């Protein structure tokens, strides 16, 4: 089970996620998120991520081509364009600058759930209010479950990630607020518990 811990703001956060066994860490550049970083800080944190762990730049309000340029300059491994504001043409523009793209959306927006539909290598399905910690109705996946490299996100926490994996059967999971002691403040013990629970979950339990 692939596990991404998102919204990390300090080198200690990254160290905790890596030590817990996370496969990827997310760094957010956003003018609206409590987890948002400025470009310089994101660059410093990206440089702190060790080899073997994927660093992902997450944006929701930066033009796609500009986000792609920033991703290349700060040295992350992938760029996640989050939200329905990013259309197929935005992904095309970003791909011309930075090739490794992730697409994050909500089923409430009736997206194309084929992995790679916009040229992305990974699809992430989130709750309608990204970063809110609100769970969503996983029964919506019936008839719309993606195939391949897709991540489940939204309302996941150590106590429910195993059940969610069993129901949704994703390739991986993404967590942010579910491992925080306060908005934007990561709890390193919760990170460890979450990653362990996700790695031990049986994806075909349901």
Image: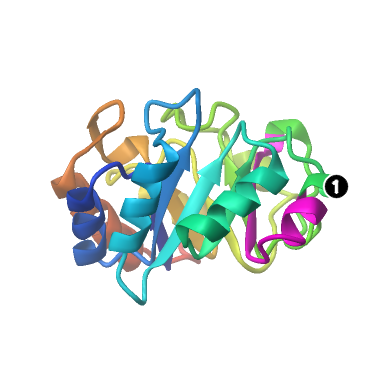
In percent of width and height, residue 135 lies at 47, 32
- Asked whether 8 falls inside the magenta stretch, the response is no
Look at the numbered disc 1 and give the secondary structure of its residue: helix
**Magenta segment:** 91-107
Q: Is residue 72 above or below residue 83?
A: below
Looking at this view, is 106 or 81 the one in front? 81
* Residue at the left extreme of this rendering: 189
On-image quarter of the N terminus: bottom left
Looking at this view, is 49 or 148 the one in front? 49
Residue 16 visible, this angle: yes
Q: Is residue 52 above or below residue 188?
A: below
Q: Is residue 2 left or right of residue 68?
A: left
What's the residue at 30%, 70% (across, down)? 50
Q: Is residue 119 left or right of residue 198?
A: right
Residue at image mark 1? 89
* Crowd rating for badge 1 (residues with CA inside 10 Å; few <14, some 14–19, many 20+): few
What's the residue at 56%, 60% (across, down)? 72
Q: Is residue 53 left or right of residue 181?
A: right
* Residue at the bottom extreme of this rendering: 52
Quarter assignment of residue 19: bottom left
In percent of width and height, residue 51 lies at 34, 76
What's the residue at 41%, 33% (across, down)? 36
- Asked whether 95 falls inside the magenta stretch, the response is yes
In percent of width and height, residue 59 lies at 56, 40
What's the residue at 19%, 56% (across, down)? 16
In percent of width and height, residue 134 lies at 45, 28
Coloration of the structure image = rainbow
Looking at this view, is 164 or 100 the one in front? 100
* Residue at the right extreme of this rendering: 89
């Amino acid at each position: 089970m692939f596990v991404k811990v998102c919204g990390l703001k300090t080198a200690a956060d990254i160290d905790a996620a890596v030590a817990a066994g996370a496969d990827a860490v997310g760094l957010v550049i956003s003018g609206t998120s409590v987890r948002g970083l400025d470009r310089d800080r994101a660059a410093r944190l990206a440089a702190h991520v060790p080899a073997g762990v994927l660093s992902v730049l997450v944006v929701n309000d930066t033009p796609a081509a500009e986000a792609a340029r920033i991703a290349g300059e700060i040295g992350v491994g992938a760029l996640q364009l989050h939200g329905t504001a990013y259309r197929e043409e935005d992904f095309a523009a970003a791909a011309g600058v930075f090739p490794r793209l992730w697409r994050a959306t909500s089923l409430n927006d009736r997206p194309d759930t084929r992995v790679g539909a916009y040229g992305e290598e990974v699809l992430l399905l989130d709750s309608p209010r990204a970063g809110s910690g609100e769970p969503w109705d996983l029964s919506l996946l019936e008839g719309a479950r993606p195939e391949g490299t897709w991540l489940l996100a939204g309302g996941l926490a150590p106590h429910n990630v195993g059940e969610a994996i069993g129901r949704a059967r994703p390739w991986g999971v993404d967590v942010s607020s579910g491992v925080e002691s306060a908005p934007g403040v990561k709890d390193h013990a919760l990170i460890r518990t979450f990653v362990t629970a996700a790695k031990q979950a049986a994806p075909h339990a349901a």
